[in-house]
Amino acid sequence: MATVTIKHISKSFGNNAVLRDFNEVFEEGEFVTLLGPSGCGKTTMLRIIAGFEKPTSGELYIGDELVSGGKTFVPPEKRNIGMVFQSYAVWPHMNVFDNVAYPLTIKKRPKEEIRTNVERVLEIVHLSQYAKRFPNQLSGGQQQRIALARALVAEPGLLLLDEPLSNLDAKLRESMRFEIKEIQRKLGITVVYVTHDQTEAMAMSDRIFLINRGVVQQSGSPEIIYNQPANQFVADFLGKVDFFKGISENGKITIPSMGGQTLSYDGPRSGKVEVAIRPENLFFDDNGILSGTLEEQYYLGDVDDCRVRVGSTLVRVIASGYEYRKRKKGQQVHLGVRDFMVFEDDGSLQEMLEIQT
Ligand SMILES: Nc1ncnc2c1ncn2[C@@H]1O[C@H](COP(=O)(O)OP(=O)(O)O)[C@@H](O)[C@H]1O
Ligand SMILES: [Mg+2]
């Protein structure tokens, strides 16, 4: 097992500053996810940890060992790391056993040791009965498990996974999440997982590091990041959210775009604010604090995805699909508000939303 200590790491390609002052510790046995929009620097960070890329400045430790920084640079093969990429290259001319054995074969490990280790990891990834098959006789998910087994066979202390499920179809992706998580628990190994998929990050991680433009916006458990986002970017990237400009004074927030309707608020922010409401935190309720007109509803089975016009603005409501038939388009409705978030209106939201698109 291994900790990863990242001390003030920055990375530029020419004038392009890709990572800015990354300063984090990943704990032993922790499942950490680097999450963020495409191009934010996730893969670059992972490649620096692996040793395929040198940081422009800063230091990287694996366990207690300095592996990158100053004059020191430990090459990838000496870092005791397993890696799986999105495009999992398995060798088509080798059977499953030989594919998985490869990292040990090139190290010229004794035959018996190779056999024991390969059998052990094949068991872990549920491929024991396919040892003699060739990759083209297996499904995409099974091929990805070959890559995973190969990454694990040399018993690395650290496993790096870069969007390993992106090439799989939706159902398989979901079941593989749980498999990877289970393998990590079983082995007690430290995992650094890269994805742009927030649901994947939420389902698997002990801690998520949400990155935007090479800067960690927030780190924390899925619950913390989802429910107590540090800024509008975080609130917007994880889950669904609508933002409304408001004025906070005397224990309430008035929202002009909602025709001046108000929410009670006893938090610390006053003056101009940005209110963020997650659509699942709104519900239809005759005594609800907001009122409007039901403009659209999309019945999705488990949920009913609705748009309600409140004042001049459209508000998204995700209600349980169970009571779908009770409502009709064009009907006057009231909405209760379970929870909402309040940010300073510093103009950053617009900037952040523009970056994402
Ligand atoms: N070898 C490279 N040379 C030049 N620019 C690179 C190189 N690798 C990555 N970049 C740039 O760094 C930025 C971050 O890339 P990357 O780490 O791959 O992002 P992510 O994995 O989050 O999508 C992008 O703007 C990308 O074009
Ligand atoms: Mg990437």
Image: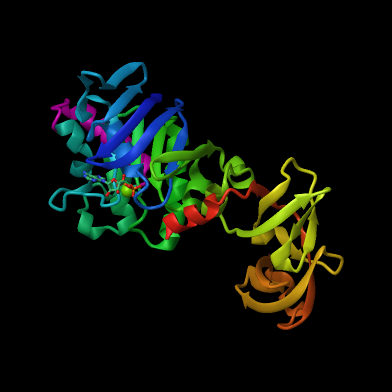
Q: Is residue 32 above or below residue 96?
A: above
Q: Quadrant of the N terminus?
A: top left
Indicate the quadrant where residue 162 lies.
top left
Q: Is residue 277 above or below residue 296?
A: above
Q: Furthest-front residue in view?
A: 271
The residue shown at (74%, 40%) is 268
Looking at this view, is 133 or 49 the one in front?
Answer: 49
Looking at this view, is 322 or 292 the one in front?
Answer: 292
Rendered location of residue 192, percent (x, y): 39, 37
Residue 317 in sight in this render: yes
Q: Furthest-right residue in view?
A: 287
The residue shown at (13%, 27%) is 108
First to last magenta residue range: 106-126
Looking at this view, is 39 or 272 the one in front?
Answer: 272
Looking at this view, is 197 or 11 the one in front?
Answer: 11
The residue shown at (33%, 32%) is 10
Magenta stretch holds residue 81:
no
Q: Quadrant of the C terminus?
A: bottom left
Q: Is residue 326 above or below residue 191?
A: below
User: On the picture, is 244 further left or further right than 350?
Assistant: right
